[in-house]
Amino acid sequence: MRSWWKNVWPPLVAVIFFLLVWQLLTSLFHIEQWILPAPSDIAREAAAASGGLWEHVWATLKLTVFGFAIGTAIGLVIALILHLIPFLKQALYPLLILSQNIPTIALAPLLMIWFGFGLLPKLIVITLVCFFPVAVAALGGLKQTDPVMMNYMRMIGAGKGQIFAKLELPHALPSIFSGIKIAATYSVMGAIIAEWLGADKGIGYYMMLQKSGYRTDRMFVAIMIIVVLSLLMFGLIALLEKWFVRWKPKQG
């Protein structure tokens, strides 16, 4: 408990200090609410609109979880295939990197044209955002397997499957979870971008409505929800990492 609190209180104090400075500056300089609302105005609006927001939050959360799961699975499969077939890795790894040079916001309209305005193009957008950090992190972790242990297992007659299951995969788990944590935070933003381009509910859709009405306070409410969802996704993966990677040494 003390260790958990030791890690939490420094960023918590920093956030509280930032909010206090924000509140003070908006009051001191009499900044109009439609330009930059104070934290108290945002909190008041969040409480007033909480009933109507749940439907949008739930829609975004479902889209995020589905897209994140698909993107993570595809990233792990790609990493496994490229690791087991070195020739494919040499041929396809540069293309894997180039796939991230296309802005998602530019590709998403094409997906809407090709696949319509249903669920599929939205899941593709989130998958494209999530699979890359998982694949790259998994490939890096599998590549860093201890060569001494690798030679030892070969000497005692271990097959490729045994080496992968008992040495390479466990050794790569910390790197894999690092990529998954990055993908978890990206997945929320991927869902928001997908909703911007075509949806009838969700936080992204809610933001577009409030932007049209110049409701800056409600825009900040949506941003707060996005931050909370990203932190929840990250925290869940961090808990899973502690469960699966119990042998990992503690960081000082």
Image (cartoon, rainbow, N blue to C red):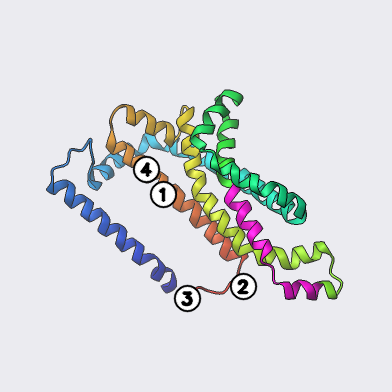
Amino acid type at image mark 4 = Ile
Is residue 155 rendered magenta in the image?
no
Q: Which residue is depicted at the point 47% across and 52% down?
A: 232
Circle 4/circle 2 CB separation < 8 Å: no
Tell me the residue that label 4 is attached to: 223
> Considering only order in the chain, which callout, 2 or 4, is on the residue closer to the N terminus?
4
Magenta segment's dominant SS is helix
Tell me the residue that label 3 is attached to: 252
Residue furthest to the right in view is: 157
Amino acid type at image mark 3 = Gly
Q: Secondary structure at mark 3?
A: loop
Q: Which residue is depicted at the point 77% across and 52% down?
A: 87
Circle 1/circle 2 CB separation < 8 Å: no
Tell me the residue that label 2 is attached to: 247
Q: Secondary structure at mark 2?
A: loop
Q: Image quadrant of residue 148? A: bottom right
Gap between marks 2 and 3 measured at Cα: 15 Å
Gap between marks 3 and 4 measured at Cα: 33 Å
Tally the marks. Answer: 4
Whether residue 113 is visible, yes or no, is: yes
Q: Which numbered tag is attached to residue 228? A: 1
Circle 2/circle 3 CB separation < 8 Å: no
> Considering only order in the chain, which callout, 2 or 1, is on the residue closer to the N terminus?
1
- Report whether 140 appears left or right of 109: right
Whether residue 67 is visible, yes or no, is: no
Which circle, 1 or 4, is nearer the viewer? Answer: 4
Amino acid type at image mark 2 = Trp
Gap between marks 1 and 4 measured at Cα: 9 Å
> Considering only order in the chain, which callout, 3 or 2, is on the residue closer to the N terminus?
2
> Considering only order in the chain, which callout, 4 or 1, is on the residue closer to the N terminus?
4
Gap between marks 4 and 2 measured at Cα: 37 Å
Q: Which residue is depicted at the point 39% across and 44% down?
A: 225
